[in-house]
Image: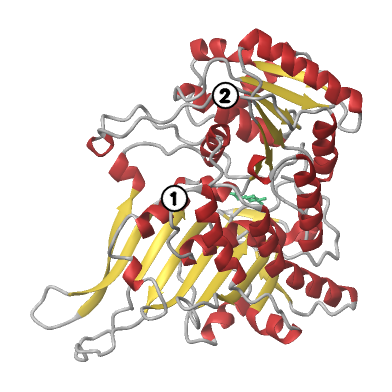
Amino acid sequence: MTTAARAPRQSPPKGRPRTPSPAPNPLRAGLRLERVPEPCTIVIFGGTGDLSHRRILPALYNLRHAGLLPSETTVLAFARREYDDAAYRAEMEQAVETYSRVPVEPALWQDFAPAIRYQAGDFADPASYQALADRLEAIDAERGTRGNRLFYLATQPSAYTQIVAGLGKAGLARPDRGSWARVIIEKPFGRDLESAIALNREVTRVFDEEQVYRIDHYLGKETVRNLMVFRFGNGIFEPIWNRRYVDHVQVTVAEDLGVEGRGQFYEEAGASRDILQNHLLTLLALVAMEPPIAFEAQAVRDEKLRVLRAIDPQWSEARIRRDVVRGQYGAGWVGGTAVPAYRDEPEVAPTSTTETFVALKLEVQNWRWAEVPFYLRTGKRLPKRATEISVQFKRPPLMLFREAASEPEPNLLALRIQPDEGIMLRFAAKVPELGLDVRSVNMDFTYGSSFATEAPEAYETLLLDAMLGDASLFTRADEVEAAWGIVTPLDETWASWDHAGHDEDLERYEAGTWGPQAADRLLERDGRRWRRL
Ligand code: BG6
């Protein structure tokens, strides 16, 4: 995340319709009980920031509500501001009321609130870490948290190394026998390959890699997790999941939001660092990976890494001009509201060349995927929020139904990550009439209607996994570096063009449209088009 005060904004749960208690659902009958983690103290660095308000505390409350958080578990916010426990608790109560997925039950809150504590400290001051160590011991004695610690770095990324070093010096990274210490690190993890390598080096100087949990919250989304179940829990899809049957794959992460008061952060990041380096490449890796030998952290991450390594990171300028489109939104209308141009957003330079849109074509150079294009795109201020992976299959080898008035579209499998979470398969069907007309029809599965229950938020899943010591949904050092290896040459080339005053490739698009026309041309050149979402 970016700044404690302005962490990257995820879909605001605020105001979302809360699902009433669903009627018992036969599809959920007999599900195995969830695992409950050992008690621990969760130390949130940057506990007064946006991420803690919107995501972390609501997620912890929801876990408690679901009976998955042992009552001893304690939350200790650590930040610069002077608060006492009561003041911090009161602020978090409001935050949880505003952002929690499940409505707050007063009795449960009364039970949960004493577990929330605050410790003022300075990230640069060794004495603050000593005070933290003393406080943690006191909490262990008082609440039975058994010396287990989950450190959550939700601060400005620039503070990460300082905090990790402080924890190391205070002996907090090496727990007593029988206890554990883990550290969750928010994105962005570095801003290019070099800084990511440096950060990994600093972090692993203090913690072992097994103790480090790097978050890409897309991996915690239910639909993203289901992608692996869909691919590897079914027998019929894997045989056709390759270059023989697949024509191409599209991955879209579209947002209708702008930069939402995070201009300063976004000026430094742009769409390539904010979404492409992590969320988009994560989705690509999950779609393209080989079946892991086991469903456990190392095996899954090994396969994801292989995909990233199979993407050619040699970006010549000519290849960038040909296969990558960057864009920036101008003023326009989104959802019936007039919105300003990116350059007119607060904290954004009037001559900014930061991209708010990227579309690109990649190839995964292995036996399964060689020559199958993967088209990725992401943008802010597009017409709607929609994340989708679509696998477009090849046309049948022979068109038997030439007489049909229209040629059906080739088969398509759309995995809707959000919203309207579900899976759709498009196939050809005969129109019921005397002639022989063929049309494309859709077979649709939606989570909402099939399971009649609301899925947990990504942060609930990820926090629970970190407490359980399951790192499958977190990113390993080598994966982060491989992803930066793909994105950094692009960012550097753009920066050099900008520096030389040659930013002609930066396309403008009107807010509320699907991005620059150059993104359409990227596919049209190959005889394809973006799926309309
Ligand atoms: C964050 C980015 O990682 O993801 C934000 O920093 C973006 O810019 C957000 O808005 C999107 O997340 P979600 O869960 O709303 O798709």
Is mark 2 in CB contact (under 8 Å) with mark 1? no
Q: Is residue 437 above or below residue 375?
A: below
Quarter of the rendering containing residue 53: top right
Q: How many numbered circles are shown?
A: 2
Image position of 364 (left or right of 74): left
Measured as percent of width and height from the top left, residue 161 is found at 83, 43
Residue ID at (78%, 42%): 3
In screen coordinates, is 451 left or right of 75?
Answer: left
Q: Is residue 311 above or below residue 27?
A: below
Amino acid type at mark 1: Phe
Q: Position of residue 284 (x, y in %)?
A: 53, 64
Q: Residue at x 31, y 41 (%)?
A: 451
Few, some or many C-alpha atoms within 10 Å of disc 1 (few <14, some 14-19, many ≥20)? few
Q: Secondary structure at mark 1?
A: loop
Above or below residue 459? Residue 351 is: below
Instruction: Residue at 21%, 86% (x, y): give it.
Output: 404
Which label lies toward us, 2 or 1?
1
Residue 106, how many percent across, how many down? 51, 12
Look at the image and tell me whether residue 81 can be seen: no
Task: Give residue 97's mark.
Answer: 2
Q: Is residue 308 visible?
A: yes
Apparent side of residue 213 relative to residue 163 in the rendered image (left or right): left
**Distance Cα–Cα, label 2 vs label 1:** 36 Å
Q: Amino acid at mark 2?
A: Glu
**What label does residue 295 carry, if any?**
1
Give whichever of 456, 466 is nearer the camera. Answer: 466
